[in-house]
């Protein structure tokens, strides 16, 4: 059986190509059945996210070219373009790749946790589609096991490695609980959208999004149950904000020292935490001079992110060692299964030979042939039948002077070696 991990990701293919070959959840069952039908895949799992589309498949004589051709035809894409932007791992390398993906070691953001859930969902979809057997059941359960170990025994996901998440983590250090904090987000770009999601995940109950265009603010706020403001309304609401995070494309500051100073006075100097993620700055640097204002810039957070990335790199090395151990365990189990299959086939073949010869002997006895002659003939034919294949193997090893195989055959057949018998 050939095990292959084939795909494209954020490292090898532009977003335009990744979009072309992405699988929607609704199309997954059809895709898995088509994959089995057209490539002969015995077992398969398809992982499809915004950053990757990967096919994990196993079959006799399976090739990366066959998977490339199938993926191109299924999505009506160009096979040559896919071939230039894809990667293929086989056997041991494929096993380690699957585990690295699930552990977040192959992600755009090192150690990101979402991919494990996506791999688990892909496995469930494949199992529900009937394309999972014992090998992949074992492989993916061991993959999930090592991913859990990496999460619990290393710091791979414990530190913030994006400025959006770092700003939320920093706020958590200043406020013991974010749940009761009033949070004001200024802007409606991708960064603020990420901050809003992180704040929502932290259980923030009072969240407001301010933007020049209300429609953009509402697109972020509505799914999270947050309120919206225009930029002109900020001066009236700033006094209520415990946490302010801003990231706009404005060429001029949104919050000046005077505005924040008045808000602090209205708050009776209750501390305010401010994060400016914009370039050019949204918050005047002088705000940091105010006694009760704690201002951080994107540069401050970038230093935190870089330090945390170093920590994750160290954790990634620990994770690689765990993956090597888990992959080895799976390979040992797989080799054991192969041995069981060989033994079963050997026993079945021997029993078939025996049954054929016994049936013939019984027929001879029924025809009145002398019992002693029948027994001798049965013994001779059974012996010849059972030693035929080993005899051929021994002769071949001897002719080729293959001492290694000769020794293995002697041990397997319980034969004394020449060097042993001379002792």
Image (tube, helix red, strand yellow):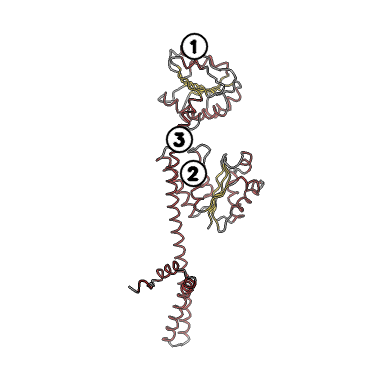
Q: Position of residue 83 (x, y in %)?
A: 62, 48
Q: Position of residue 294 (x, y in %)?
A: 45, 19
Task: Decide which of 161, 262 is in the foreground and name it.
Answer: 161
Q: Quadrant of the C terminus?
A: bottom left
Mark 2 falls on what kind of element? helix
| Residue at the extreme left | 423
Task: Decide which of 85, 46 is in the foreground and name it.
Answer: 85
Mark 3 falls on what kind of element? helix
C-alpha gap between disc 3 and disc 2: 21 Å
Task: Decide which of 311, 269 is in the foreground and name it.
Answer: 311
Tell which circle, 2 or 1, labels the residue nearer the N-terminal end.
2
The residue labelled by disc 2 is 102
- In this rendering, the count of numbered labels is 3
User: Residue 252 — which label?
Assistant: none
C-alpha gap between disc 3 and disc 1: 41 Å
The residue labelled by disc 1 is 262
Whether residue 312 is visible: yes
C-alpha gap between disc 2 and disc 1: 50 Å
Q: Nearer the viewer, mark 3 or mark 1?
A: 3
Residue shown at the point (44%, 42%) measured from the top left: 317
The residue labelled by disc 3 is 310
Mark 3, residues whose alpha carbon is within 10 Å: few (<14), some, or many (≥20)? Answer: few
Mark 2, residues whose alpha carbon is within 10 Å: few (<14), some, or many (≥20)? Answer: many
Residue shown at the point (61%, 22%) measured from the top left: 213
Tell me whether the residue at label 3 lies in contact with that at label 1, contact meaning CB atoms closer than 8 angstroms: no
Mark 1 falls on what kind of element? helix
Tell which circle, 3 or 2, labels the residue nearer the N-terminal end.
2
């Amino acid at each position: 059986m050939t095990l292959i991990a084939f795909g494209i990701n954020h490292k090898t293919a532009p977003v335009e190509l990744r979009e072309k070959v992405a699988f929607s959840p609704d199309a997954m069952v059809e895709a898995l059945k088509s994959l089995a039908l057209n490539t002969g895949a015995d077992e398969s799992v398809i992982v499809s996210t915004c950053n990757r589309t990967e096919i994990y498949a196993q079959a006799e004589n399976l090739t990366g070219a066959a998977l490339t051709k199938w993926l191109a035809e299924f999505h009506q894409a160009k096979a040559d373009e896919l071939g230039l932007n894809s990667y293929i791992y086989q056997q041991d390398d494929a096993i380690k790749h699957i585990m690295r993906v699930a552990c977040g070691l192959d992600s755009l953001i090192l150690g990101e946790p979402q991919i494990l859930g996506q791999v688990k969902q892909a496995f469930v979809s494949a199992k529900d589609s009937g394309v999972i057997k014992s090998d992949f059941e074992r492989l993916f359960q061991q993959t999930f096991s090592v991913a859990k170990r990496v999460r619990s025994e290393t710091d791979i996901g414990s530190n913030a490695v994006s400025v959006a998440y770092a700003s939320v983590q920093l706020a958590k250090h200043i406020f013991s609980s974010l749940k009761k904090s009033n949070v004001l987000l200024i802007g409606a770009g991708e960064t603020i959208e990420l901050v809003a999601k992180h704040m929502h995940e932290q259980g923030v109950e009072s969240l407001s999004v301010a933007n020049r265009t209300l429609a953009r603010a509402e697109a972020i706020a509505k799914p999270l149950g947050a309120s919206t403001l225009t930029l002109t309304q900020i001066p009236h609401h700033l006094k209520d904000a415990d946490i302010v995070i801003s990231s706009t494309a404005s060429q001029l500051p949104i919050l000046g020292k005077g505005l924040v100073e008045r808000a602090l006075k209205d708050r009776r100097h209750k501390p305010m935490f401010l994060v400016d993620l914009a370039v050019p700055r949204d918050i005047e640097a002088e705000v940091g001079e105010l006694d009760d204002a704690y201002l951080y810039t994107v540069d401050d957070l970038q230093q935190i992110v870089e330090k945390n990335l170093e920590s994750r790199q160290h954790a990634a090395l620990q994770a690689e060692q765990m993956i090597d151990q888990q992959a080895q365990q799976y390979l040992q189990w797989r080799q054991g299964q192969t041995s069981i299959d060989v033994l079963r086939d050997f026993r079945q073949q021997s029993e078939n030979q025996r049954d054929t010869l016994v049936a013939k002997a019984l027929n001879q006895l029924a025809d009145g042939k002398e019992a002693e002659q029948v027994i001798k003939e049965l013994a001779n034919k059974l012996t010849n039948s059972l030693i035929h294949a080993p005899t051929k193997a021994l002769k071949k090893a001897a002719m080729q002077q293959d001492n290694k195989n000769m020794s293995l055959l002697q041990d397997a057949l319980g034969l004394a070696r020449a060097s042993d018998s001379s002792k």
